[in-house]
Amino acid sequence: MKELVNRIKELKKNKNAVILAHCYQNAEIDEVADYVGDSLYLSQMAAKTNADIIVFAGVYFMAQTAKILCPDKKVLLPNLKSGCEMADMINLRQLREFKNKYPNIPTVCYINSTAEVKSECDICCTSSNAVKIVESLNAEKVLFLPDKNLGRWVEKKLGNVKVITYDGYCPIHHNIRTNEIEKVKKENPDVKLLAHPECREEIADRADYVGSTTGIMNFVKNSSDKKFIIATEKGVVDRLERDYPEKEFVIVKENLICESMKLNHLKDIYDSLNNETYEIKVDNEISKKALRCIERMLNVSK
Ligand code: 13P
Ligand code: SF4
């Protein structure tokens, strides 16, 4: 492993490349990553890098977003099978139908969406800035897609905006059930529950903290508690266990795994950088329109 790590680092230097890694990736990738974090952080880092090549250890929509932000750079996704099931729940036709059903209402799309969908939405958001983004619109009603759980959570947090949600969700987070949470809470009384906002409303209601992947990790960092219940993908728990060996983490259920996030291992990163595969391309017109939607978010998130 050490040798592979060194070879990747050498390639990075020679090719002026950076590696961005989402915190659901296999934790070994952090050894070579320049930036590790949530979707917002990674898109901010992509927007400001001076590198010639970006290797995105994440899923397709993340690499596509990086390409839209940096059209002149080479953006590589190590495995083209790394999709996001939630992002694939809405296409352009379905978006248009949704907008036609509720005309003249601003449309907010979660970053977990395709470039085509972003190109016809007003503003983008991530789990860490969704509340702020919706609030920034000063609207009585907004359309929110694809994640109905995140949309519901934003509506509850704001209290004065009607959030009309599309019927999309993350199969991994949506699969966490109230009875499972109740059971873990009962087994671990007085232990705080930290949940991702892609979880069902009933789970978010029971959580002591709801936030992005980085938000959850920061909560642990800043807390004096010694034990936590975590309701998000296992990659976050792996990193927490690595970084805080003195603390204990209870994952709400087994198999909270996003398979397409786990396709990358160090060897895949090496191959991607060495062979410069697989290059992400986005149609020019779509890219320009989607950029407006993403940049508007980044400006609000500064
Ligand atoms: P974060 O932006 O919180 O990292 O979430 C991305 C994601 O895909 C969660 O399922
Ligand atoms: Fe998509 Fe869910 Fe995987 Fe996140 S965890 S990338 S939302 S399928």
Image: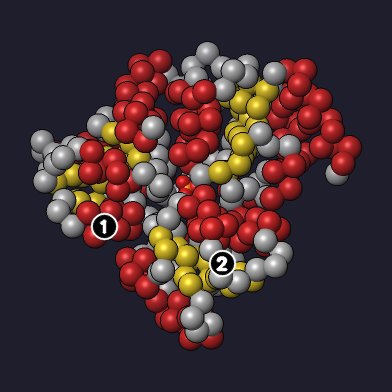
In depth, the one of 220 and 34 nearer the eye is: 220
Q: Which residue is mark 2?
A: 224
Quarter occupied by residue 125: top left
Please say whether residue 129 is visible from this viewpoint: yes
Q: Secondary structure at mark 1?
A: helix
In depth, the one of 183 and 226 nearer the eye is: 226
Sooner in the amino-acid sequence: mark 2 or mark 1 = 1
Please say whether residue 101 is visible from this viewpoint: no
Q: Position of residue 295 (x, y in %)?
A: 36, 26
Please state which amino acid type lies under the numbered disc 2: Ser
> Residue at coordinates 52% horizontally, 13% vertically from top-left?
72
Mark 1 and mark 2 in contact (Cβ < 8 Å)? Answer: no
Q: Position of residue 142 (x, y in %)?
A: 18, 44
Q: Which residue is mark 1?
A: 157
> Residue at coordinates 36% horizontally, 44% vertically from top-left?
129
Q: Position of residue 75 (x, y in %)?
A: 58, 24
> Residue at coordinates 53% horizontally, 63% vertically from top-left?
223
Q: Position of residue 116 (x, y in %)?
A: 35, 30
Task: Tell me the crowding category of disc 2: few under 14, some 14 to 19, or many 20 or more residues within 10 angstroms, Cα based.
Answer: few
Q: Is residue 130 left or right of residue 268?
A: left
Q: Quadrant of the N terminus?
A: top right
Residue 137, label in figure: none
Task: Tell me the crowding category of disc 1: few under 14, some 14 to 19, or many 20 or more residues within 10 angstroms, Cα based.
Answer: few
Check the image and name the residue furthest to the front.
224
